[in-house]
Each structure stands twice: as structure tokens, then as C-alpha cells.
């Protein structure tokens, strides 16, 4: 009897842990809204179809008795939505940008007519997510293409409000077994979110923690060619990120499709373009001018 109760307890804890882990892996978004007619009455059983550039195939459903619909687990990208109902014209709305962690509301009004008649909405007021209170910045793929940045996702963290690169948060050469937050992270700079140190923020790649077990810094290097979106949360962070007293940086990878395609790339950096000719110190120069060649870090003004 005791063994059975113990087994039930273990199973219950495992399910709870698995549920919490899956919930923490925020890599998708959603769409919701209400379908009404021109008089404001809700339209039940209207057929709603969503199509997306990052979605393999279409997703569809019928509205509830209240006219409400909701799509979950949609990968970030550009979407269109089409609504049809008996006795009404078909409405098609394009240009909906869906970001990770967002659930925007897209309400649709149908006009009386036949379903063969199509009303296309190409421009409208931007959708606003009124369902969350998290302060977050979503750097989508198109933004990343047009934004100057380094080789890995850490270089765009400072684009979010309350986030910045912090020279005092890094120490080139590593810190060995130093306690989290007691010294540098082994890099030329750390990242501060809302005044918190590197060790007080969470760095996720596809929902998986990538922080260094000792210093708490981000150790995963993900090239932008493989990134769909970078999400930076700076306040109002959900309970599942309880260890993140500063911020949460979440990297969502690009997904494949049914089409065959490929690309190639290479990177090149000339030390002469870094503003310093000493290869030992040129990484530090970007954040700490006192580490420039010719200066003694222990006594920078002695030379």
C-alpha cells in the first residue's frame, strides 16, 4: 500500500515537472479574436483558416457559439487569416506579424453576401496584445537582417530597454570556480538587465537554459543565420522563470520547410578595423579604453 502511494506521488511530481518544463519552453505565439457581423452580433461556426510563412500547412477551426476563436503554438513569422461563413462574404486579412510569447487579438467583421465574394484587408490598425503584462522586446528575423550586430545573439541584448552591455561584468581569461556574481564571466563584457548581473538573468535557446554553471553567463554561441527571433524580457517575468531576477533572453531557431533550399556564409574580421593593433587587447578596447595598447591596466596613467 505504501509502495503504491509512493509510486503515485512520484508519477504526480514527474508530470508536474514535465508540465512546468514544457510551459517554460516559450518558442511560439498565438492568435485569437471574435467574429461578428455588421450589426455587432457574434457569428458562430464561422470557418477560420490561418496560413504562415513558417507554418507547415494550414491550421483551421470553427468559431465557438460566442464567435470566439483561438490558435495556439504558432511559430513566429508573417501570417494571413481567412474567415468564411454561410450568408457572408469571405474576409481575408494579410500582413499579421506574430512574435514569440504574444497572443494578439484580431477581431473580424463579416458583411452579408456570398462566400464566393472575398473582402481583402491589406492595411489596418496594428494588432495589440492585451493578454500579457510582460515587458519584452521581440527582435524578429527581418529586424535582425537590417540591424548591425555581432556574430551571436548576445550582441542584440542591449537593444531592449533596461538592458545594456556591462564592461565590469566581464573579465577576459575566465574566473575558474568563482561563485556566481562574485567576479567576471570570462568574456570581455557581461550584460546587465534592470540593474541585475549576468548571473541573475536567464539565457535560453529553444527553451533550454544555457547559462554557465559557475558564473551564470551565457555560453551558447548561436550564429544569426540560424535564428528566427530573439526575445528579451526585462520585467513582468512569469513565475516559471523564478531564478531570473534580471531578465530572460530567449532564442528561437529557424525552422525547416517542405521546400529544398540552402545557403552558405563566411565571416572575416580584420584586427586593424577594431581600432587597436595589439591582438591581445583588441577585444577589450571596444568596452574598456584603458586596456588599449601602450597603457598599463594596473597603472593606466603611468606611461
Image (cartoon, rainbow, N blue to C red):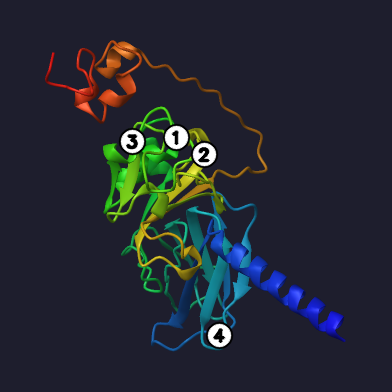
Of the image marks 4 and 3, the number of the one nearer the N terminus: 4
Of the image marks 2 and 1, the number of the one nearer the N terminus: 1
What residue sits 67% from the left and 43% below the top?
258
Q: Is 68 located above or below residue 92 in the figure? A: below
Callout 3 secondary element = loop
**Pointer 2 and pointer 1: residues touching (CB < 8 Å)?**
yes
Q: Is 7 located above or below residue 172 in the figure? A: below
Q: Distance of mark 2 from mark 3, alpha carbons?
A: 15 Å
Which label number is shown at residue 220?
Answer: 2
Residue 214 visible in the displayed image: yes
Of the image marks 2 and 3, the number of the one nearer the N terminus: 3
Residue identified by numbered label 1 = 152
The percent position of residue 68, horizontal first and vertical second, equals 51, 81
Of the image marks 1 and 3, the number of the one nearer the N terminus: 1
Please give left or right for residue 170 compared with residue 69 in the image: left
Please give left or right for residue 54 compared with residue 296 in the image: right
Q: Distance of mark 4 from mark 1, alpha carbons?
A: 47 Å
| Displayed quadrant of residue 86 | bottom right
Other residues around mark 2 within 10 Å, as few (<14) / some (14–19) / many (≥20):
some
Callout 4 secondary element = loop
Decide which of 123, 183 is in the foreground and name it.
Answer: 183
Residue identified by numbered label 3 = 189
Name the mark nearer the viewer: 4 or 2. 2
Q: Distance of mark 4 from mark 3, alpha carbons?
A: 55 Å
Residue 115 visible in the displayed image: no
Total of numbered circles in the picture?
Answer: 4
**Pointer 2 and pointer 3: residues touching (CB < 8 Å)?**
no
Amino acid at each position: 500500500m505504501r509502495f503504491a502511494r509512493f509510486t503515485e506521488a512520484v508519477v504526480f511530481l514527474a508530470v508536474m515537472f514535465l508540465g512546468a518544463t514544457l510551459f517554460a519552453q516559450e518558442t511560439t505565439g498565438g492568435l485569437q479574436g471574435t467574429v461578428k457581423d455588421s450589426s455587432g452580433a457574434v457569428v458562430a461556426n464561422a470557418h477560420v483558416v490561418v496560413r504562415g510563412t513558417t507554418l507547415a500547412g494550414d491550421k483551421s477551426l470553427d468559431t465557438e457559439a460566442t464567435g470566439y476563436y483561438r490558435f495556439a503554438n504558432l511559430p513566429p513569422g508573417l501570417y494571413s487569416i481567412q474567415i468564411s461563413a454561410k450568408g457572408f462574404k469571405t474576409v481575408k486579412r494579410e500582413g499579421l506579424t506574430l512574435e514569440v510569447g504574444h497572443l494578439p487579438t484580431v477581431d473580424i467583421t463579416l458583411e452579408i453576401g456570398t462566400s464566393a465574394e472575398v473582402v481583402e484587408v491589406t492595411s489596418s490598425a496594428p494588432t495589440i496584445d492585451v493578454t500579457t503584462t510582460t515587458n519584452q522586446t521581440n527582435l524578429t528575423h527581418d529586424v535582425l537582417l537590417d540591424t548591425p550586430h555581432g556574430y551571436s545573439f548576445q550582441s542584440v541584448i542591449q537593444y531592449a530597454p533596461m538592458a545594456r552591455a556591462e564592461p565590469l561584468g566581464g573579465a577576459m581569461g575566465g574566473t575558474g570556480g568563482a561563485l556566481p556574481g562574485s567576479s567576471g564571466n570570462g568574456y570581455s563584457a557581461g550584460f546587465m538587465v534592470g540593474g541585475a548581473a549576468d548571473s541573475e538573468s536567464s539565457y535560453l535557446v529553444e527553451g533550454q537554459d544555457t547559462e554557465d554553471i559557475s558564473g551564470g553567463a551565457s555560453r551558447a554561441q548561436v550564429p544569426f543565420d540560424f535564428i528566427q527571433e530573439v526575445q528579451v524580457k526585462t520585467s513582468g517575468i512569469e513565475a516559471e522563470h523564478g531564478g531570473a531576477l534580471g531578465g530572460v533572453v530567449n532564442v528561437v531557431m529557424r525552422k525547416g520547410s517542405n521546400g529544398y533550399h540552402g545557403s552558405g556564409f563566411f565571416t572575416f574580421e580584420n584586427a586593424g578595423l577594431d581600432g587597436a593593433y595589439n591582438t591581445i587587447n583588441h577585444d577589450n578596447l571596444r568596452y574598456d579604453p584603458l586596456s588599449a595598447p601602450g597603457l598599463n591596466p594596473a597603472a593606466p596613467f603611468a606611461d
